[in-house]
Amino acid sequence: MTALIVDGRENVETCSAGTVHALARTVGCDLRVPLADGSECTYANFDLAASAPALECVYRQVEALLPTYASVHRGAGHASQVSTDAYEAARFDVARFVGARDDDVVVFTANTTDALSLLAGCVPGDTVVLDIEHHANLLAWSGTRVVEAADTVSETITRLVAELCSRPAALLAVTGASNVTGEVLPIARLAEIAHACGARIAVDAAQLAPHRGVDLVATGVDYVALSGHKLYAPFGAGALVGRRDWLDAGAPHRAGGGAVRNVTVQHTDWLPSPARHEAGTPNLFGACALAAACRALTEIGWGAVVAHERELTGRLVAGLSATGGVRLLRLFDDAADVLGIVTFTVDGLAPSDVAARLSTGYGIGVRDGRFCAHPLLERLGLPGGAVRASLGLCTGSDDIDRLVAAVAEIAAGS
């Protein structure tokens, strides 16, 4: 048995892949919140799939940059040079984190939604998507062709092959892991299929990247989009990483200073990527925070991260499965891997009521609703939504037990 340091508290856990160390400490891990009875307790955050708290090492990185903050790319002074170097170093760290190819481009964006919208403006043709996608990936594209997912990953792949082979498509855009159920799609296999059909593949890794390693070279994925606010770096930055040619040929994501080589009243000479899509003063702190989180997760090691998460997810699934009146949601019968996301309903209770009672009665934060994935909830027969509990580095076994006990009391009508 080893002491697993996850959020500033020691939790005794078995962790075959090692120990998640102090880099996993998050800001606000000891937050005290009020309860309806007038008492207070330590907050248990199970809404990490929406936004994760900042790692302490990320916060320190931002704090260290403040004294030398200045204009990026456009200043001759020392502070500007330091800021520019930090910004470009962040680009390198993000590229390394996702296993980018040497000639791939890292474009800093506001978040995953922004990154996918940027790519959508550069795609020279139709885009194929699944009906289980987050709205960011379902709504971004022009010329969208939607494929209905099946009850198995295997049959879903067969349907994608049929669609991609039916007529040419430029891009297959898929989630790396469902933001509703946490089920992971086989992106290396999907990349192989897309390429065989003459298409490229883009992966919405907003949920995947905080939980599993992403490697563009190993998987053959052409583009990946991710968000800092889900990756323990909530400072307003995300990234699009991928092949240069479409990004250099596409319309600039925003028009403005920094994205141009020369401007006359008759003509604009746009720079190549990434500057082409990063007009205006860049978010230095967001980019550097994102890079710091990437470095921290790499140093912690994916073996330790995955072992920690699987232990706790299994504990949560077992606890909720044994609770009468609770239904757990799944999309596929054959998903090989599932992230730390457990979505459920409680018989006879609206999801909003369950979430409110968990908050006011137990100091537990979850998400309720349709999770920006309305077609998926319709498929599951839940147009009114569900309750989502999502965990990560800052979750401990005591948090899991507390949530299971609270749901059991609510389900029993206590």
Image: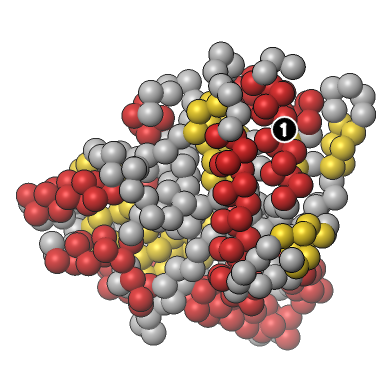
**Residue 74 in view:** no
Q: Is residue 247 left or right of residue 344?
A: left
Residue 317's place in the image compared with 305, above or below, is above
Residue name at image x 66 percent, y 42 percent:
46
Kind of residue at disc 1: Ala
Toward the viewer: 12 or 84?
Answer: 12
Which colour style is shown? secondary structure
Q: Residues within 10 Å of mark 1 (few under 14, many from 20)?
A: some
Residue name at image x 34 percent, y 29 percent:
379
**Residue ID for mark 1:** 405
Q: Quadrant of residue 14?
A: bottom right
**Where residue 248 appears, x then y in whole percent?**
32, 71
Q: Quadrant of residue 74?
A: bottom right
Residue 36's place in the image compared with 375, above or below, is above
Toward the viewer: 56 or 186?
Answer: 186
* Residue at the farthest right position: 39
**Where residue 356 appears, x then y in whole percent?**
69, 24
- Image quadrant containing the C terminus: top right
Residue name at image x 79 percent, y 34 percent:
363
Secondary structure of residue under mark 1: helix
Q: Quadrant of residue 377?
A: top left
- Image quadrant containing the N terminus: bottom right
